[in-house]
Image: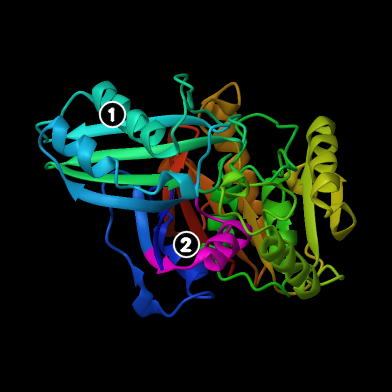
Amino acid sequence: MSKFFLVVPPGIEDQTFKELKLFLPTSQINLDHGPGDEALELEGDLELLYKLNLWLRTPNRILMRLDSFYANHFAELEKKANKIPWENFLDRKSSIQIRTTCKKSKLYHSDAVSQRIHQSIETRIGARVKLIKTTVDENQPTNVQLIVVRLVNDRVTVSLDSSGLPLYQRGYRQEINIAPLRENLAAALLLSSGWTHEQPLIDPFCGSGTIPIEASLMARQIPPAYQRSFAFENWDNFNKSLLSQLRIQAKELSKSGPGAFIQASDRDAGAIQISANNAHRAGSSEWIEWKQQAVSAIEPPQPNGWIITNPPYGGRVSSGTDLRNLYAQLGNVLRKKFFGWEILFLTNDAELAHQTRLTLQPGIQFSNGGIPVKAYYSKITS
C-alpha cells in the first residue's frame, strides 16, 4: 500500500471529498492538510492510483509519497534519500524536475536539497539522470518526472507526481475565450450545486464551453481524463494491461445518451464556435444545444432545472455600468421566465451579484485566474 496526496485548488476540497467517497470508505480518507498545498491523503495500490487519475474531476494532480523522514543536516539527508527505491520508477532514460520548498528547517537552501536528491537518484540507478531546471509549467510533457520535496520543521517528505500535465488539462479545451474557467473548477462548481444529471441545465454565458462540456461528461459518466496520458505510464513499474483494462471498464460504464438537456449560449458568435469545437474534441458536441443569443433570449425547456454559469466580472467587459446592467438583466429574465428554476453563478463582486435582485445564498469560493470568486445560489420564486 502507498500513500497518495491529492493536490487540490484551495476552496474545493469538499467537492474532491465527495468524489473520493465513490472509491473509498470515508474512514480511509484523511482530510488533514499535508505540508504545502496537498489537501487530501489516502492509502491504496497502483490500481487505485490509476483510477483516481482517470476519474477524479477536481484535483490538479496526484502525488505518491515515496518517503518521509527527519533530517537536519546534509549527511543525514543523503543517507536517507539513498534508501528510496528510485529504480522502481525511474531509469537512466528518465528526465526529472525537482521542486523543493523549505520552511522552519535547518536545511533551508532548496537548491542544495534538490542537488542531494538528484545525487541519490543517480546513486540508486547507477547512471546519470537528466535534470531539467526550468520551472514546471502546464505544458510539461508526461515523460518528465516531477519530484516534490518539502521540508517543514526538519521533516522531509519526498513525493513523485503521478499525473504529469495538470489533471484539469483534459485535452479538449484547445481554444479559449476571455477569462476561461479551468475544467476542474467548472467541475467543482457543478458538484457543489444540487444539479442532478437528469435535470436540464443552461449556461447563458458559455465562453469556452467548459461548464456545459463538464456537465455533459458527468451526465454520461465519462472519465474526464479518458483521452489523455499520465506520468505514471513512464514509471518502471507501470502496468499497461491494468490501465487498458480500466479504460475498457470506463467505456462500458459510460452512457451513450445525453443524460440531460444541456444548452450553452452566448451573444458572441466566436464564443459559440470555440465552445462547439472544444465540445467536439470532448465527444460532447451532439449532446449540447448551442445557441448564439443574448441572455434576454433564454427560455426554460422544462418547468424545473438549473442555470449554472460564469458571467463576466472584473476586467472582462469595458465598464462597471455594463456589468451592473448585465446582472440586473439576468435577474429580470429569471424572475420573468424561470419560476421554479435554480441558479448558481460565479462572480468576484458581491455588489454585482445583488444587482440580480434575487434572494442569494453564498456557495463555494476559490481563485479563478488569480481572481477570488464566490458562487451564489438562488431558487427563483418570484
Name the image quarter holding the N terminus. Answer: bottom left
Of 5 and 261, nearer the camera is: 5
Can you name the residue that lies furthest to the right here? 286
Residue at 51%, 37% in the rendered image: 145
| Residue 33 point in image, percent of width and height | 28, 55
User: Could one spot residue 287 in this view of the protein?
Assistant: yes
- Give coordinates of residue 220: x percent, y percent: 76, 68
Residue position for label 1: 116
Left/right placement of residue 91 relative to residue 172 reads: left
Is 381 drawn above or below residue 202 in the view shown? below
Marker disc for residue 16: 2
Residue 172 shown in magenta: no
Residue 207 or residue 352, whichever sits in front: 207
154 horizontally vs 364: left or right: left
Residue at x 43%, y 58% (from the top left corner): 363
> Viewed as shown, does residue 146 lie left or right of 201?
left
Instruction: Please tell me which residue is depicted at 39% across the width and 78% down the height of the picture.
Output: 26
Tell me if I can see residue 344 in this picture.
Answer: no
Which residue is more in the foreground, 296 or 225? 225
Question: The residue under label 1 is which amino acid type?
Answer: Arg
Give the magenta part as a residue range.
Answer: 42-60
* Position of 275 relative to 334 (above/below): above
Callout 1–callout 2 Cβ contact below 8 Å: no
Which quarter of the picture shows residue 238?
Answer: bottom right
Instruction: Please give the name of the residue rendered at 27% of the width and 61% of the height, measured from the top-left corner.
Output: 32
Task: Return the x and y of residue 280 as percentages of the image width and height.
Answer: 86, 46
In three-dimensional space, the C-alpha distance between marks 1 and 2, rounded to whole angstroms, equals: 34 Å
**How would you rate the neighbour count of disc 2 (Cα within 10 Å): few for under 14, some for 14-19, many for 20 or more?**
many
Q: Quadrant of residue 256?
A: bottom right
Residue 59, magenta (yes or no)? yes
Left or right, 106 with respect to 150, comes to left
